[in-house]
Image (cartoon, rainbow, N blue to C red):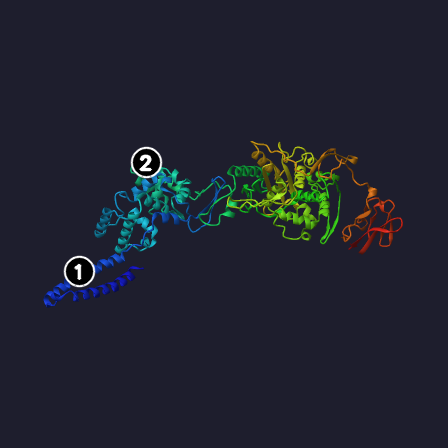
Amino acid sequence: MGVEARLRAAWIWARRVEARVDDMIARAGGWLLDHRPRTRRHWLLTGLGALFVAALTLNFLTMPPPMPDYASVRAAWQPSEAWLYDRNGVLIDSSRVDFARRRLGWTPLDKIAPPVAEALVAAEDHRFYAHGGVDWLATLAALRDRLEGKPSRGASTLSMQVAGFLAPDLAKPGARGWLDKIRQIRAGLSLEGAWSKPHILEAYLNLAGYRGEAQGIGAAALGLFGKTPDALSRDDALLLVALLPDPQASAATVARRACAMARGTNCAGFESAAYSMLGPTRSLQLDPGLAPHLAQRLLTKPGLRITTTLDINIQRIAIAALKRQLEGLGGSRARDGAVVVLDNASGDVLAYVGGIGGNSTAPAVDGASAYRQAGSTLKPFLYAQAIEKGYLTAASILDDSPVQLDTASGLYVPQNYDKGFKGLVSVRSALAGSLNVPAVRTLLLVGVDAFRDRLWDTGYQGLVEDGDYYGYSLALGSAEVTLLEQADAYRSLANGGRWAPWRLTVADPRPEPRPVTTPQAAWIVANMMADPNARAVTFGLDSSLRLPFWAAVKTGTSKAMRDNWCVGFSDRYTVAVWVGNVEGDAMRAVSGTSGAAPVWRDVMLALHADQPSRAPAMPPGIEEWTIAYAGNIEQPRREYFLKGTGMTLVASAPPEARRPRITNPVSGSIYAIDPDIPIDRQRLAVAVTGDAMTHRLLLDKQDLGDAGAAPLILPGPGRHRLALLDLSGKVVDQVVFTMR
């Protein structure tokens, strides 16, 4: 309410009071009936009533707003930041949520360097500890100066200024009249009656605005000096207090004020210190900044304090390992990376590194939660499902040779990473060596829909389409997954096939794990992934995947070298690493063992520096056999089988035992003649597998001769039928293809 409105309300109220006083006078008694005495007494009493009304009116006009107590003010303090802590309560990061002003947490007086309070009292209210809220000497001096026409000096005490912070209308622009001054005085007296001196001093330092958007001693100390309030020096305190009369003052003005407060101390350093304090290079460093992506994800409200499951030491280890690797690769090869570390037993996320910046062109993107193509990292779950169903054993032989599969979108021709083929290989070698064609052949046994459902049950929540959408490429990781999903899925293998969601904060629930893969299949697959000899053909004996203790690991590279993964587990930890470019452009000369694997190795070595990992105990239901391979396909070894499926000799079916069939062309294929290539250079090779020495090929109605001759054909445009006939003329296989 403005002064004019207050005066109007007071006048109406005063007239009502005057009317009541007149009524009281009229009823006072018979001795007032004489005219002359009655008139003098009437005016006397009227005057007294008027003075009473005036006093009441002045009291009403200068009534200050009610002052809250200290506890309420502190409880209502709302920082602009939110904070993230590790599992032991150590601050690891923060995020600014309120951008209207910059406030940190409320800073108690005992956490503020004593020179700050001393400088504040000396500059703003040197009789602070002697008065009761109003410095009457300073007030009378200010009144004298105004009557004499001299420039008036401020007489507001710290108590009156704090009252102004708590009730902004006390200090609103234009509030300089004598009625406003009396309101401020009364507010200061009211505050002093309820608050202690230390509380008033503490509130002032926290409520005052310092520079720009910084409010409170916490934001000011960190923003202007890069220090916490308890680390401010005497010179820092003088400069900070010199800023209070005009927070936007120039460095020279601030230095001059600080020098005046120093009282004879050498002032040579104040000017340079003031320029440094107010310079553009000063930044507000709030915390270690160790988990910015997680802070952005979890800190959504001002003042929020979240205790995560992270371990600050493991977080630092993961950051250092990733930073070292990305710097070694250089921005021209790979710019981004992410690391996640899980505790196998609890599912707690012990490290969450969404990126480190560096050469990244999109450092704010969270690489740990971004969906990327999985590459070969899904193969362990495929082989586990095949072993669990009894379709394969770790010793079973798979054919790593060219294959063409007819799909709704055309031919699918999987190839290995090195573009070569190994021929007949065991399941152990196929998984450890990350061979693609054997994985696709395994998917044909398991079924695309069944495998997709297994992946969903193992926590890959990005697989929202049915199996037909992904097709046979699902075996090679065409689906998109996150690094967190990868880590938790592999953790299920470490826990005997039991899956449960990870935990990011201590408030997250601990749900009971549910079985997804049988303990036997999970153990056998982990044993294959931990076998350095099995992966030697592809990765060599001394790659980044080999550790001086037991660990199961799998690498993966997505299509066109866009993503590089390395995920593995020890007896206590699961570590997942992704390296790539968040924009999706291909990496240059980065493979599974040169990209993500070195980071995985460094983190694993650091985690087990004091206690090496031990191989998990074999669960019941597994038997161990010494096996040999007919034809020396692989070297003899000890192998593990589900109970009742063991064997000692493994042999591949002889060619004569295989049903003859046409492998090229693939039925449903469409081939086009290129007009820019000479016609005699364009031929289609016919390929037949199995014992086909006594079989013949028939293209439409033309006899092509012996099926074992592998003829080259060039049919004309149109639809064609190629048949394989036995000696009796019976069709044992046929394909239909089109030429354009």
Give the residue furthest to the right.
728
Helix or strand or loop: what does disc 2 sit on?
loop
Say which amino acid is labelled 1.
Leu
Q: How crowded is mark 1: few (under 14 residues within 10 Å), some or many (20 or more)?
A: few
Residue 529 percent across, percent down from the top left: 66, 38
Label whose residue precedes the other's in the sequence (2 or 1):
1
Question: In which quadrant will I find the N terminus?
Answer: bottom left
Residue 395 in the figure: left or right of residue 137: right
Give the number of the disc on residue 266: 2
Q: In the image, residue 75 lies at what x, y percent?
A: 39, 48
Q: Residues within 10 Å of mark 2 (few under 14, many from 20)?
A: few
Q: Can residue 243 be seen in this view?
A: no
Alpha carbon separation for disc pair 2 and 1: 62 Å
Residue on which the image places disc 1: 48
Q: What residue type is labelled 2?
A: Asn
Most foreground residue, 590 or 664 = 664
Q: Quadrant of residue 386?
A: top right
If the image is split into quadrants, where does the C terminus sit? bottom right
